[in-house]
Image (cartoon, rainbow, N blue to C red):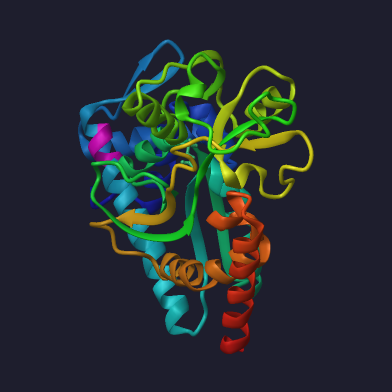
Amino acid sequence: MIHATLHQLKVFEATARHGSFTRAAEELYLTQPTVSIQVKQLTKSVGLPLFEQIGKRLYLTEAGQKLLSTCQEIFNGLEQFEMSVADLKGMKQGQLKLAVITTAKYFVPRLLGPFCKRFPGIDISLKVTNHKCIRESMIANEDDLYIISQAPDQPDLNIHPFLENPLIVLAPTNHPLARKKNIPIEALNNERFIMREPGSGTRKAVENLLAENDIEVKVSLELGSNEAIKQAIAGGLGISVLSQHTIISEGTTGEFAILDVQGFPIERDWYVANLAGKQLSVVAETFLQFLLEESPDMAKRLLPGLGRAALNGNEEEAANEKVADEKMAAAKA
Ligand code: PGA
């Protein structure tokens, strides 16, 4: 392996990721024959086949898989080194890989604006997906930081809560329960319900609460997107349980009503997490500190309706909460 070059390892890593010489060549701006020659030379240095070709697709052999994880360690190490050097030079520079659950896309991009302004040398890659896919990314060690609202049993994580993420019952404004107060949870029995896809954390939390209360809803539709669910509710296809963040910018004045059902909101938080065994890069550490320090203030400015009092429609309590917040902000200033 002493004769293998960093360039060959890069070519191999891209080929393994795509399962194709052609796609690796496209990504690296090389010709397909160049890619295959580089992989051939690397295979010679290793002394064992790295790929098996079945039809058009390439599959990694056992040696190929081991080499791929070695490559990832080498590239991660080099990236970390680059960031540390930039830090020593007094610059925050490098790439931050973030993976966030679907509801965090309503908040995190707004936080990234001021972050990128403060640290213009940091590039961000943001992946938005559900809890199941986030767990897979964690296991594959694909990202620096994860935003979740339920921590999986495995892998081991360092987690910090940073903002509320309540789940509410959302219905169209003309729903018969829309004006009722303190609705018993049994009223949800046999309601037509729109459910998120399997693998969604929202779905898991809802299923747990319904099962604990022996409630059976009629799932009329299963959708993999919070926005699609909102459209289906507005279209009269049923009710659903979603994070309050999904409606915070439009509120409930238009097409939606939050049903005041007992047991709701399901109280949860967003957590920022990283793999326990992984050393955070300089830029990941910088973002983590920024997120923990800035998000409460930013949430107060951008999400004034997030407090529990506001959610329950108790205007007096909400007003008191607002006054208390303003006092705290004045005291801080
Ligand atoms: P989900 O997570 O996209 O996996 O449902 C969203 C949330 O828990 O807020």
| Left or right: where 33 falls relative to 150 | right
Residue at 46 percent across and 71 percent down: it is: 286
Q: Image quarter for residue 30? A: top right
| Left or right: where 318 falls relative to 217 | right
Residue at 59 percent across and 35 percent down: it is: 26
In the depicted structure, whether residue 161 falls above or below residue 136: below
Q: Nearer the viewer, residue 222 or 210?
A: 210
Q: Nearer the viewer, residue 101 or 162?
A: 162
Q: Is residue 38 visible?
A: no
In the depicted structure, whether residue 330 falls above or below residue 122: below
Q: Nearer the viewer, residue 61 or 111?
A: 111
Residue 298 lies in the magenta-colored region: no
Quarter of the figure that contains the C terminus: bottom right
Residue 222 in the image: state x and y as whole percent. 54, 18
Residue 180 in the image: state x and y as whole percent. 63, 34
Q: Image quarter for residue 27? A: top right
In the depicted structure, whether residue 126 falls above or below residue 316: above
Instruction: Report the span colored magenta.
Output: 64-68
Q: Nearer the viewer, residue 153 or 19?
A: 153
In the depicted structure, whether residue 245 falls above or below residue 202: below
Residue 199 in the image: state x and y as whole percent. 41, 28
Q: Is residue 141 visible?
A: yes
